[in-house]
Image (cartoon, rainbow, N blue to C red):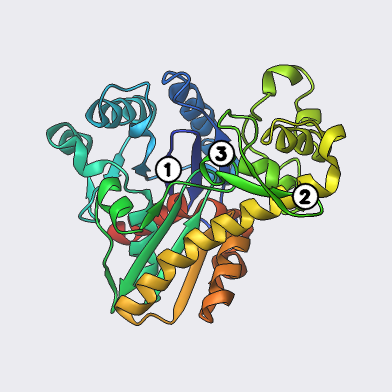
Amino acid sequence: MFAGIDVGGANTKVATSATDGFIDTIYAPLWKNKAILYDVLLEVKQKFEIGAQAGIEAVGVVMTGELCDCFTTKREGVLHIKKTLSRVFKNVKFFDIDCAFRDGSEVDKDPLSFASTNWLASAKLLSEQYKDAIFIDIGSTTTDVIPIVRGEIKAKRTDLGRLKFGELIYSGVLRTNLATLLKKVEIGEKGENCRTSSELFAITADAYRVLGYLNKDDYRCESPDSHAFAGRENEGKSRISAMRRLARVVCCDLEEIGEDSVVSIAEQVKEAQVAELVASMKSMKQKYELKMVVSAGIGDFIVKEAADLLNIEFLSLSSRYGKEISAVFPAYAVTKLLEQTFS
């Protein structure tokens, strides 16, 4: 059996290759404390060593956590992640920008070839099944929009390149500051325009908690005012708490503007994310004549709405693999790709 680990800046995701294997997403904010990764990986290793998970032959790794600002450079971040994984696990294989698995010694020689590879593992696995499609993965923080044409992954291999060409949208459905999505909102019965505050008052998780797309368990990050809910975190992730945070986006409280206005703000958040995704999808649809979208991640509902607006076929990987695997798809993909190399 094989395991895959996707080390992000906020979450570490894990999957194994076995049927009914181990799947998990662990909130582990490296940007707060890079040493947390070691503790998280030890916990994962302990789970691997019990029951049906015992007997891991090799561990495949992809990452994006090297971008965290606890590292002075991406190079430092990649090497820290590599070193930590190599301390905890034996036979670790790192997935590079050429879609090949390498030993840790190769990471030391060219660290940047292993930076930001999680989306690439997903696209590589899917390119074997869907030769012509736009692969989209909306997670907690970012959105990958990857064109696959005749089985070839057309996306750039760096975050900078993908940002330039609309293949990476730096917003997700949990951790994104609403002020980065909305400079103005319409509020009140008359739909008056109102500027938003640039403070970190609310995040996308709050909008989708209010709209009902997320429940408390789905809210897998800290709320902007988590300090106020120490010891009672569930209360901080309630719908009413999310509504209060949304009201602050226009420098109000819930008493001042009421629930209807707060719900309207949440709906405008979704509209903004859908519109941004539509723009990227439309460009790729026209450039490559693609007629299908394959979607992974926890933001399926955004992709579905965008696909409907463009009248393009929509396939959710949740329907094929289940919601849990879809949510950790890069970890699952690197596991299956590693299994192929050993077969």
Q: Label 1 near label 2: C-beta < 8 Å?
A: no
Q: Residue at x 47, y 29 (%)?
A: 41
Q: How many marks?
A: 3
**Where residue 6 is drawn, which disc sits there?**
1
**Distance from Cα at disc 1 to Cα at disc 3:** 28 Å
Q: State how far apart marks 2 and 1 are (Cα).
A: 34 Å
Q: Which mark is residue 179?
A: 3
Q: Say if 143 sits above or below 90 in the image.
A: below
In this view, the residue in front, 54 or 86, is 86
Q: Quadrant of the C terminus?
A: bottom left
Three-letter code, disc 1: Asp
Q: Nearer the viewer, residue 55 or 273?
A: 273
- Amino acid carrying label 2: it is Val
As drawn, 39 above or below 99: above
* Mark 1 surroundings within 10 Å by alpha-carbon count, few (fewer than 14), some (14 through 19), many (20 or more): many
**Relative horizontal placement of residue 46, taking residue 267 as reference (left or right):** left
Q: Secondary structure at mark 1?
A: strand
Residue found at x 60% / y 42% = 174
Q: Dot 3, crowdedness within 10 Å: few (<14), some or many (≥20)?
A: many
List the residue tagged with mark 2: 263
Question: In the figure, residue 341 lies in which quadrant?
Answer: bottom left
Closest to the observer, 233 or 267: 267
Precedes in sequence: disc 1 or disc 3: 1
**In what element is the residue under mark 2?**
helix
